[in-house]
Amino acid sequence: MLKNITFSVEEELILKAREKAVSEKTTLNVVFRRWLKQYADRKKEQEIDMVMESMDYAVSGRKFSRDEMNER
């Protein structure tokens, strides 16, 4: 059984999302259902991996010693 839900989103974002969905020959409903299923099925380890991947741009430039990492 399908249920309706309502979201509040900036109009510009909705327009851009609709344009993209049309270019992919789909609808926002289909895109949202896919995303919601992936979100609900995602395991904690996958979430951690996604966060780590999103932070791969951060490079310290060197390795820190154990004492340096534990400094407060």
Image (spheres, grey):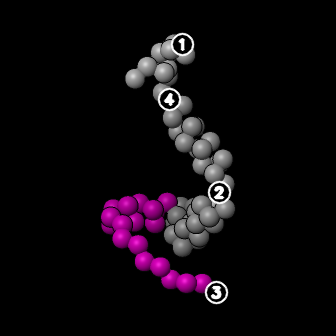
Is 32 inside the magenta-drawn segment?
no
What residue does disc 4 label? 57
> In the structure shown, which secondary structural element does the residue marked by tag 4 occupy?
loop
In three-dimensional space, the C-alpha distance between marks 1 and 2, rounded to whole angstroms, equals 35 Å
In three-dimensional space, the C-alpha distance between marks 3 and 4, rounded to whole angstroms, equals 43 Å
In three-dimensional space, the C-alpha distance between marks 3 and 1, rounded to whole angstroms, equals 56 Å
> In the structure shown, which secondary structural element does the residue marked by tag 2 occupy?
loop
What residue does disc 3 label? 1
> In the structure shown, which secondary structural element does the residue marked by tag 3 occupy?
loop
Mark 1 residue type: Ser
N-terminal of the pair, mark 3 or mark 4, is: 3
Identify which residue is drawn at 54% across, 42% down.
Answer: 51
Task: Locate residue 11, reporting x and y percent.
Answer: 33, 66
Mark 3 residue type: Met
In three-dimensional space, the C-alpha distance between marks 2 and 3, rounded to whole angstroms, equals 22 Å
* Quadrant in which residue 50 is drawn: top right
N-terminal of the pair, mark 1 or mark 2, is: 2
Q: Nearer the viewer, residue 35 or 64?
A: 64
45 relative to 28 in the view: left or right: right
Which stretch appears magenta?
A: 1-20
Quarter of the image with the N terminus is bottom right
Q: Using the rendered image of the protein, determine whether residue 15 is visible from the camera's viewpoint.
A: no
Identify which residue is drawn at 48% across, 27% down.
Answer: 58
